[in-house]
Amino acid sequence: MRTVVVHTHPPTSALLALHTASISQYWHKLSDPTFRGIYHVNAFDLAMMIPYFLVLFVLATYGLHRLLARLRLLQVPSQYSRPHAASHPAGRA
């Protein structure tokens, strides 16, 4: 029987060990029942959170719309651009 030895760099092994440890820690924190039963959503919370997130979504959509409009404006040459110095009557802009 032959023994196969795989050589890896120490940083690679350490990163792999950290990655597997972080996944198990993340799952443990997700399934931790410590604070279960302490907080229950009520009507007041929903009355505050639903309008808040709706306004947040509308503002984010408007901001994205403005960003895309500005990017499109930069791609198209404008008909209202400033004239060049040579075409100005006084010779200077």
Image (spheres, helix red, strand yellow):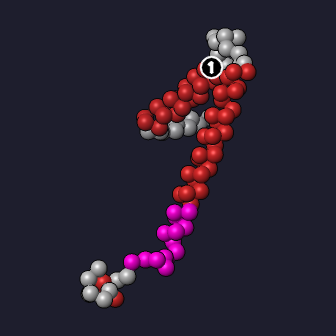
Q: Residue furthest front?
A: 90
Residue sitting at x 59%, y 25% = 26
In the rendered view, does 20 fall on the left or right side of 38? left
Q: Horizontal and vertical percent for residue 6? A: 52, 38
> Label 1, on which residue?
28
Q: Residues within 10 Å of mark 1 (few under 14, many from 20)?
A: few
Q: What quarter of the picture does the N terminus occupy?
A: top right
Of 65 and 92, nearer the camera is: 92
Taking the magenta stretch, the answer to whether it contains residue 77 is yes
Looking at the rendering, the stretch of residues picked out in magenta corresponds to 69-82
Taking the magenta stretch, the answer to whether it contains residue 7 is no
Of 84 and 22, nearer the camera is: 84
Q: Is residue 89 above or below residue 36?
A: below
Residue sitting at x 51%, y 63% = 70
In the rendered view, does 5 fall on the left or right side of 58? left
Residue sitting at x 71%, y 16% = 40
Q: Tag 1's secondary structure? A: helix
* Whether residue 7 can be seen here: yes
Q: Horizontal and vertical percent for residue 30? A: 64, 22
Give the mark count.
1
- Give the residue type at disc 1: His
Q: Horizontal and vertical percent for residue 42? A: 72, 18
* Whether residue 24 can be seen here: no
